[in-house]
Image: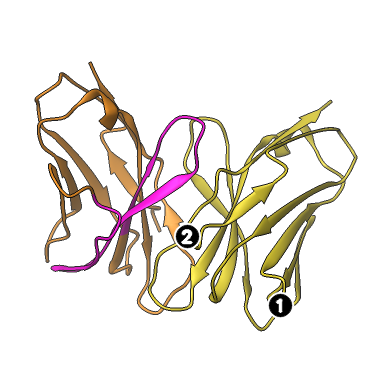
Chain colours: A orange, B yellow
Amino acid sequence: NAGVMQNPRHLVRRRGQEARLRCSPMKGHSHVYWYRQLPEEGLKFMVYLQKENIIDESGMPKERFSAEFPKEGPSILRIQQVVRGDSAAYFCASSPPGGNEQFFGPGTRLTVL
Amino acid sequence: SQQGEEDPQALSIQEGENATMNCSYKTSINNLQWYRQNSGRGLVHLILIRSNEREKHSGRLRVTLDTSKKSSSLLITASRAADTASYFCAPHMEYGNKLVFGAGTILRVKS
């Protein structure tokens, strides 16, 4: 059973461009979570999704950030018009229905030039 | 905030010694989880302790939970150089389904 997969692992964008981060949960997992980690800090919750539903987006910035988890395909975290402050590691985690433990992917490291 | 706050921020020990990290949180929890993160990598789940449990073991790991004090501790016995990493506690809220991480404890085990 493959773990949580994220791609790309590293992403470089210039200010004003769009960043798309993808997350494929573990097989059988229908819950996906996105977290952001700034250097030397812990992970900060961004959004919790189930298939075709956003359950909790209390950690998402109000503008430029969006997330989806379609019926088919990976979950996407989209950042429009990136700024330097968006540079961070973005981690995705998944869990099965009713599960408490979250399994994390290797992360996508976004660098905004 | 219901985030877990780890203490100490950094810990340096010799191989073979025990390492103890503490975590405090602020709200009612369903369970509390400990994770490890090696530099530049994703998080690895170590252990989960439910709110009705007081102690749990897994290999060289021992976790305690005191819900009356809203605190938990992680003990790593007979530490190894490979244990060098950042360790995070993540209280799982009683309501909702998100983990809230603190800044972590950076553990360095010297060989």
User: Considering depth in this image, is A27 or B35 the residue closer to the camera?
Assistant: B35
Q: Residue furthest bottom?
A: B52
What residue do we see at 30% from left, 61% from top?
A: A32
**Split into 4 quadrants, where in the image is the N terminus of chain A?**
bottom left
Mark 1 / mark 2, whichever is N-terminal = 2
What residue do we see at 14% from left, 21% from top?
A: A15
User: Considering depth in this image, is A4 or A58 the residue closer to the camera?
Assistant: A58
Q: CA distance from mark 1 to mark 2?
A: 18 Å
Q: Residue furthest top?
A: A113
Measured along the vertical axis of the image, is residue A1 above or below residue B30? above
What residue do we see at 51% from left, 31% from top?
A: A40
Q: Is residue A41 left or right of residue A57?
A: right
**Split into 4 quadrants, where in the image is the C terminus of chain A?**
top left
Question: What's the magenta region?
Answer: A33-60
Q: Main secondary structure of the magenta part?
A: strand
What residue do we see at 55% from left, 43% from top?
A: B103
